[in-house]
Image (tube, rainbow, N blue to C red):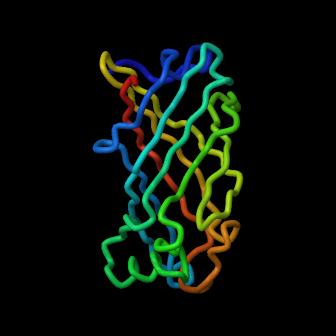
Amino acid sequence: MRGHMHLTSQILPAGAYRFDLHRSSVSFTTRHMFGMGEVVGTLSLEGGDLFVADSPEQSRVTAQAAAATFDTGSRQRDKQVKSRKFLDAAAYPTLGFVSDSITAENQQWIVRGLLTVRGEPVPVAFAITHVQVGEADARIKAEARIDRYAHGVTKMKGMAARHLDVVVDAWLQRS
C-alpha cells in the first residue's frame, strides 16, 4: 500500500468500490456505570459501497451493519443492547449510513450523511483519518461520535453513556 491522503489529491482513484466485508469492521468505545468504566465493542458490516467521483466532493458512500452482531464480549450486556431497550435488533435489523456530502475541512476529509438506527435517521459527520491505496485494494478509516439519544435510544441513562466513539475500518475492492 502506498501513501496517506493529501487533500490536494483524490481520496482514492475515481471509480466504484465495494466494501470487503471479511476485512472491514466497525468498532466503538463508550462508557458505562456512570462514566466509570470503558466498553469496547464491534458490529459487523453487511454491505457497503463507495463511489469516488473525479471531483471528491461529488463522491458518495453507503454502508450497512447488522444490529444483531453488536458484541462487547459480555453476553448479558449484548443481549440487553440488542433488546427493545436499546437497538431493538429484531424490529430494526440494520443500521445504515448514506452520505450526502464529502468536504475538505481543516486539512481533513469529512463525510456527512444520515445514520439510521432504530429507524431514526440522524445527521452524523465522519472524519477520514487514514487512507491507503494498493494495487488491488484500498483502505479507509473514518471516525465519528454518535449520540444514541438522537436515535431514540435513551434507556438506562446512568448505566450506559450517551455517546459512542465509532471507528469504521473499510477495506475496499474495485467493483
Where does residue 114 sit, x and y in percent of width and height? 67, 49
Above or below 123: residue 110: above
Nearest the viewer among 33 and 94 is 94
* Image coordinates for residue 109, horizontal then vertical, percent: 62, 31
Q: Residue at x 68, y 28 (%)?
A: 104
Q: Which residue lies furthest to the front in this view?
A: 91
| Vertical comparison of 3 with 18: above or below | above
Q: Residue at x 68, y 57 (%)?
A: 121
Q: Residue at x 47, y 71 (%)?
A: 89
Q: Which of 52 and 2 is in front in this view?
A: 52
Work out whether residue 40 or residue 37 is closer to the camera in this orientation and state it: 40
User: Horizontal and vertical percent for residue 140?
Assistant: 45, 34
- Which quarter of the rendering shows the N terminus? top left
Question: From what the image shows, is residue 138 above or below residue 63?
Answer: above
How many marks can you see?
0
Q: Position of residue 120 (x, y in %)?
A: 67, 63
* Residue drawn at point x = 30 percent, y = 20 percent: 136
Which of the pair 128/20 is nearer the observer?
Answer: 20
Residue 3 figure quarter: top left
Above or below: residue 31 compared with residue 119: below
